[in-house]
Image (cartoon, rainbow, N blue to C red):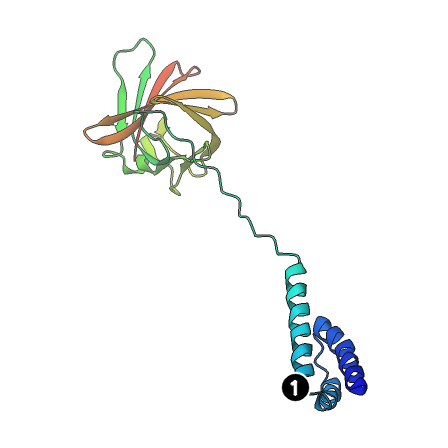
Amino acid sequence: MKKQLLLFFHCAAWLLPLLILNCRCQQNLAYFRKILIGMNRKQILILCFVLVTVAACKKNDSTPTPPIITPTPPSPPSPPDNSINPVGVWSLVSSISQQINDSAPTTYTSTDYPCISDNKLYINSDSSFKRKYLSADTCYVLNTPSYSISIGTPGDSTIGTWKQSANTVFLNFRNTISSANLSTVNGVTQIIERDTVTVLNMVVTDIYEK
């Protein structure tokens, strides 16, 4: 009996480090197999109980892996109540030029000059905006040997920021702020932007549609 107990503790002393280190050495396994042959059924059951208990404790003591937390992107700014959401891609459909103190404006539309609609206004949900002319050709609405007017030239692009108050959008480009009004006409949403060109003594009104 004393010899069997000695074999029992000798086997446990080898098997416990083996379990912890996850050893797979075939030579050691063969050696333990010989030791187990000299043990009776009761001793083998006690040994198995001890090993299972140690394995459970090791599992419970292990440091849990912290969960991976993916940051939630910020939500786009919501328009004020009862106001029109300006976020999206807008196309220029009409440009009206009028000399100050002159009652006769000149209107250019995308119906007469399709290239006008290549002028895009991108209003993004991150409070940025971009104007860009997409065509590779200059959009002439008047072109004579002595005088020409164009609404859009290749490479035209500006980037700025915007904010909204009710149905008015303020576009900030290099600290120059222009205002544009949002409205719905015959079921079509429009942005109407007015700008004073001081050098030409002219007021230009651009109308964009989605």
Residue shown at 66% from the left, 69% from the top: 53
Where's the C terminus, which quadrant?
top left
Closer to the camera, 30 or 76?
30
Residue 33 figure quarter: bottom right
Give x and y (percent) for residue 167.
Answer: 33, 22
Query: Relative to residue 14, is residue 108 depicted above or below?
Result: above
> What type is the residue that disc 1 sits on?
Arg
Tell me if residue 143 can be seen. Answer: no
Quick one: label 1, few (<14), some, or many (20+) residues within 10 Å? few
Query: Relative to residue 204, is residue 28 depicted above or below?
Result: below
Residue 24 figure quarter: bottom right
Q: In the rendered view, does 83 fall on the left or right side of 46?
A: left
Closer to the camera, 71 or 130?
71
Question: Callout 1: helix, strand or loop?
Answer: helix
Tell me if residue 136 can be seen. Answer: yes
Query: Relative to residue 203, is residue 162 depicted above or below?
Result: below
Give x and y (percent) for residue 52.
Answer: 64, 72
Give x and y (percent) for residue 68.
Answer: 56, 52
Residue shown at 61% from the left, 56% from the top: 65
Count all numbered tags in the image, as a single digit. 1
Closer to the camera, 105 or 49?
49
Q: Which residue is the extreme one toward the top?
A: 101
Residue shown at 36% from the left, 25% from the top: 80
Residue 166 figure quarter: top left
Q: Which residue is the extreme one toward the left?
A: 186
Where's the N terminus, which quadrant?
bottom right
Give x and y (percent) for residue 10.
Answer: 79, 81
Q: Which residue is the extreme one toward the front?
A: 1
Q: In the rendered view, does 143 fall on the left or right side of 1?
A: left
Kindly identify which residue carries mark 1.
41
